[in-house]
Image (spheres, rainbow, N blue to C red):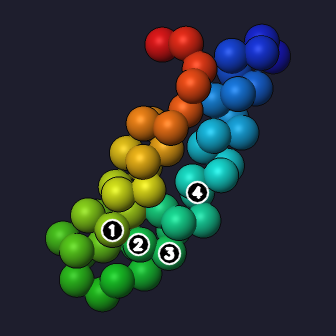
């Protein structure tokens, strides 16, 4: 696994708990929004190459 893949995997594992917590909201639309917030926050803070 390349260093880029390792960094991406670490970033994804870091945001995963928050995304899954968001999916516990009963309203499906709200659950999706709550899951996407940490997803996009992770994308913003991840310093890896695109």
Identify the residue at horizontal 48%, vertical 62% (top origin).
19
Q: Relative to 49, is 33 on the left or the right?
A: left
Considering depth in this image, is 31 or 41 the residue closer to the camera?
A: 41
| Separation of residues labelled 4 and 3 (CA atoms) | 9 Å
Which residue is most to the right? 1
| Separation of residues labelled 2 and 3 (CA atoms) | 5 Å
First along the sequence among labels 4 and 1: 4
| Separation of residues labelled 1 and 3 (CA atoms) | 8 Å
Q: Which residue is mark 3?
A: 21
Above or below, 23 against 35 in this view is below
Disc 1 to disc 3: CB gap under 8 Å = yes
Q: In what element is the residue under mark 1?
A: helix
Q: In what element is the residue under mark 3?
A: helix
Disc 2 to disc 3: CB gap under 8 Å = yes
Q: On residue 16, which mark appears?
A: 4
Counting from the top left corner in percent of width and height, residue 44 is at: 42, 36
Q: Which residue is mark 2?
A: 23
Q: Residues within 10 Å of mark 1 (few under 14, many from 20)?
A: some
Identify the residue at horizontal 77%, vertical 12% (top origin).
2
Disc 1 to disc 2: CB gap under 8 Å = yes
| Separation of residues labelled 4 and 1 (CA atoms) | 12 Å
Q: Quadrant of residue 35?
A: bottom left
Q: Relative to 3, is 18 on the left or the right?
A: left
Q: Which residue is mark 1?
A: 34
| Separation of residues labelled 1 and 2 (CA atoms) | 7 Å
Q: Quadrant of residue 3?
A: top right
């Amino acid at each position: 696994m390349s260093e880029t893949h390792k960094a991406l995997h670490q970033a994804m594992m870091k945001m995963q708990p928050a995304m899954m917590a968001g999916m516990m909201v009963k309203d499906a639309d709200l659950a999706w929004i709550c899951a996407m917030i940490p997803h996009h926050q992770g994308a913003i803070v991840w310093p890896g190459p695109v």
